[in-house]
Amino acid sequence: MVSSLGKIAVIGAGSWATALAKLLLLNNDRINWYVRRPERIAEFIKYHRNPVYLSDVTFDTSRIDFFSDINEAVADAGTLVVAIPSPYFKSEAEKITVPVADRNIVSAVKGIVPDDNMIVTEWFSSRFGCKDSNLLVIGGPCHAEEVALDHLSYLTIGCHDEEKSRLFCRAIAGPKLKTIVSHDVAGIEYGAVLKNVYAIASGMVGGMKSGDNFRAMLVCNAVREMRRFIDAIAPMERDICRSAYLGDLLVTCYSLFSRNHNFGAMIGKGHSVKAAKMEMEMVAEGYYGTFCIHEINRRTVNVDMPILDCVYSILYEGRNPRLAFQGIADRFS
């Protein structure tokens, strides 16, 4: 057990939370796990697997303390690994009444806090007074499904305290997981939001059968667009070609595991946005991220983001996808 992190509590019960719990149990004797629905906990204990997500992964449930009350899960934990989809994050996190200012908060939320238009670490700092040195983020490139399949995977752990990053790396270490540390907490978080937006765009052009040449140009320009925004919103020296930015962007834009790519593909094939949302079995974070980043850019840094604006016009203004992408094609270089 990585004792200096204290007991670790996983907050959330989706596919990413399940994958992270699998990793954590490799190196920790016990974990707490907050699962909102008591009936899901009962099924989990009975079948030793998550009944809904990544159900092929088996767990030794004798080493898991399950809770349907978030405060009971947090009470004796020194580190919280928060893996709740962004649309539901705030409603769940606001239930926390236990003091958490001095605990480690690890965000695996790949989205913006709705309404507040904040990244998750910024929200915890504002809401609970958490210290920067206690705030960590998990970046890709990594799909939960590939962790479940024991494929070689890579994660970037960001924190202003490098020793804390390395401690958490040890907490999730395994023969099939490689870890990288970074100080760029905000950049990793914003990158994780933007790559989902661009994955929707990639799915749309794929669904429209616009061709690999055009998709390559789209992704190439998306990298530069990501750099412009992140450098403006969180200035520091960074290499946008590192795995937490370009790597995560590529895997999300091209992988069949990418729910954002698949969401965009349905729209590109002619589904309405409403129909695509209804057909998705899991949350496409990029749908919400598109609106939030569009608002943040409009209100603060106001950098040139034609791909983001194109996706926004399709998702929120009802623009025809083919016409929308034709409108920005001449701007690619």
Image: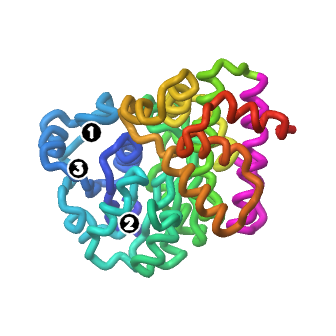
Say which amino acid is labelled 3. Arg
Residue 235's x, y, as percent?
74, 68
Say which amino acid is labelled 1. Phe
Residue indicated by mark 3: 63
Q: What stretch is highlighted in magenta?
A: 213-242
Q: Is residue 46 magenta?
A: no
Identify the residue shown where x is 77% and y is 54%.
304
Secondary structure, mark 1, is loop
**The disc label shown at residue 201, or none:** none
Quadrant (top left, top right, bottom left, bottom right) of the N terminus: bottom left
Secondary structure, mark 2, is strand
Residue 150's x, y, as percent?
46, 31
Residue 115 shows in the view:
yes
Judge whether 236 appears above or below 256 on screen.
below
Residue 178's x, y, as percent?
57, 44
Front residue of 208/151: it is 208
* In this picture, residue 313 sits left or right of residue 109: right
Identify the residue shown where x is 83% and y is 38%.
332
- From the viewer's perspective, is the residue at label 2 or at label 3 nearer? 2
Residue indicated by mark 1: 59
Farthest-out residue, right: 333
Question: Do residues under tags 3 and 1 come within 8 Å of each other at their CB atoms?
Answer: yes
